[in-house]
Image (cartoon, rainbow, N blue to C red):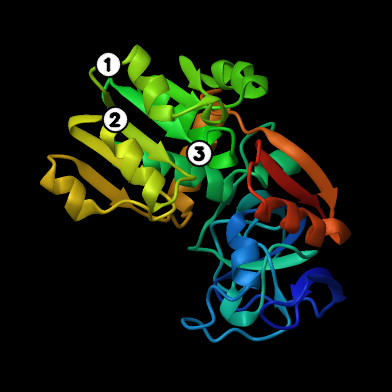
């Protein structure tokens, strides 16, 4: 099978011809049609797991994917041959990922039927980003009428967080440059602020002089997060996917801080399917590229500033 893999940590991802994996008991072989690109993919390629997981090489990259059940291993009953599925198809301990024509996933793992009417390239963009957005909003415990700032709002996670926070009844402020402000408002943002136009705190406080209730942050480093946390009212919450907040320091100020990274699960994927089918969540694919250009797409993603998701056509 064709796959994008690295021969060692730090090597340039390359197109390789590798053996097709075979499903064992309780496993599903997926014929991958599209794979979603996440920052985690290039981080793993650079060695993020080298001290925690014994990884064989070549290592196929990628986590998110969408495709068709090609074969079911012994004992599999939840999904059948020919069904359209999406999920997180990474088994790094076996050198397998979603940037390939075939991938494996456990039946009880992060895989579910695709949302109705969704095409493969859209579905492949959903699992990690949208599951993270959903978990962020769950963690923030947003109530109707609260004011929420989404930092990194134009990225895949941020766009999901804007929509889901708005759906939860929040007044949403999204970070976005002028050329993306309209998109953010269409996704549910009530206001936008532009970090390139000056200090975010001053822009937010100019409208919300008494502060805000929550920050959902997918982008800030520790110093920026400490600054943005000054926007929070007593009892406010700061959720960070970049592990940039100090929960103890925030607790001492009567605030709640949460650092987390979500693992997609069948339950989360099924919730996302329901939201997508109901029209409550839209996924914006910014860019589609062929599998053989994956290395370029990963390099671009590493630069940051994403405006939606990049998807590989397998």
Residue at position x 60%, y 46% from top?
Answer: 113
> Visible in this render: residue 89?
no
Residue pointed to by mark 2: 231
Q: Is label 2 in a helix, a strand or a loop?
A: helix
Give the quarter of the image for residue 173: top left
Tell me the crowding category of disc 3: few under 14, some 14 to 19, or many 20 or more residues within 10 angstroms, Cα based: many
Q: Earlier in the sequence, mark 1 or mark 2?
A: 1
Q: Residue lying furthest front in this view?
A: 198
Residue pointed to by mark 1: 209
Q: Position of residue 222 (x, y in %)?
A: 38, 52
Q: Earlier in the sequence, mark 1 or mark 3?
A: 1
CA distance for labels 2 and 3: 30 Å
Give the quarter of the image for residue 76: bottom right
Tell me the crowding category of disc 2: few under 14, some 14 to 19, or many 20 or more residues within 10 angstroms, Cα based: many
Mark 1 or mark 3: which is in front?
1
Q: Count the numbered circles shown.
A: 3
Mark 2 or mark 3: which is in front?
2
Q: Which mark is residue 188?
A: none
CB within 8 Å, label 1 to label 3: no
**Image-based side of 269 in relation to 117, left or right:** left
Residue pointed to by mark 3: 272
When the figure is inspected, residue 70 is found, relative to residue 244, above or below; the finding is below
CA distance for labels 1 and 2: 9 Å
CB within 8 Å, label 2 to label 3: no
Where's the C terminus, which quadrant? Answer: bottom right
When the figure is inspected, residue 66 is found, relative to residue 188, above or below; the finding is below
**Image-based side of 45 in relation to 158, left or right:** right
Q: Is label 3 in a helix, a strand or a loop?
A: helix
Residue at position x 36%, y 15% from top?
Answer: 206
| Along the viewing direction, whichever of 118 and 222 lies nearer the viewer | 222
């Amino acid at each position: 099978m064709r796959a994008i893999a690295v021969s060692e940590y730090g090597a340039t991802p390359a197109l390789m011809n590798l053996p097709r994996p075979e499903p064992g008991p309780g496993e599903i072989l997926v014929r991958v049609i599209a794979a979603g690109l996440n920052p985690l993919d290039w981080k793993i390629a650079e060695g993020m797991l080298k001290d925690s997981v014994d990884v064989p090489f070549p290592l196929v990259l990628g986590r998110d994917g969408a495709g068709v059940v090609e074969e079911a291993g012994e004992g599999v009953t939840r999904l059948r041959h020919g069904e359209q599925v999406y999920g997180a198809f990474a088994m790094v301990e076996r050198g397998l990922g979603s940037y390939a024509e075939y991938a494996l996933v456990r039946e009880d793992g992060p895989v579910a039927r695709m949302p109705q009417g969704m095409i493969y390239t859209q579905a492949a963009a959903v699992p990690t980003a949208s599951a993270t957005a959903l978990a962020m909003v769950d963690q923030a415990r947003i109530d109707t009428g609260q004011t929420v700032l989404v930092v990194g709002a134009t990225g895949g996670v941020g766009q999901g967080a804007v929509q889901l926070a708005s759906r939860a009844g929040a007044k949403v402020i999204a970070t976005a440059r002028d050329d993306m402000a309209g998109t953010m408002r269409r996704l549910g943002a009530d206001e936008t602020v532009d970090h390139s136009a000056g200090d975010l705190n001053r822009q937010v406080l100019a409208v919300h002089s008494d502060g805000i209730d929550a920050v959902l942050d997918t982008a800030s480093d520790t110093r920026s997060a400490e600054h943005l946390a000054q926007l929070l009212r007593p009892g406010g919450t700061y959720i960070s996917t970049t592990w940039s907040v100090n929960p103890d320091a925030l607790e001492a100020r009567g605030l709640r801080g949460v650092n987390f990274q979500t693992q997609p699960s069948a339950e989360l994927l099924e919730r996302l399917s329901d939201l997508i089918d109901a029209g409550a969540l839209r996924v914006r694919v910014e860019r589609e590229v062929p599998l053989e250009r994956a290395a370029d797409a990963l390099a671009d993603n590493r630069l940051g500033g994403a405006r939606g998701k990049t998807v590989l056509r397998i």
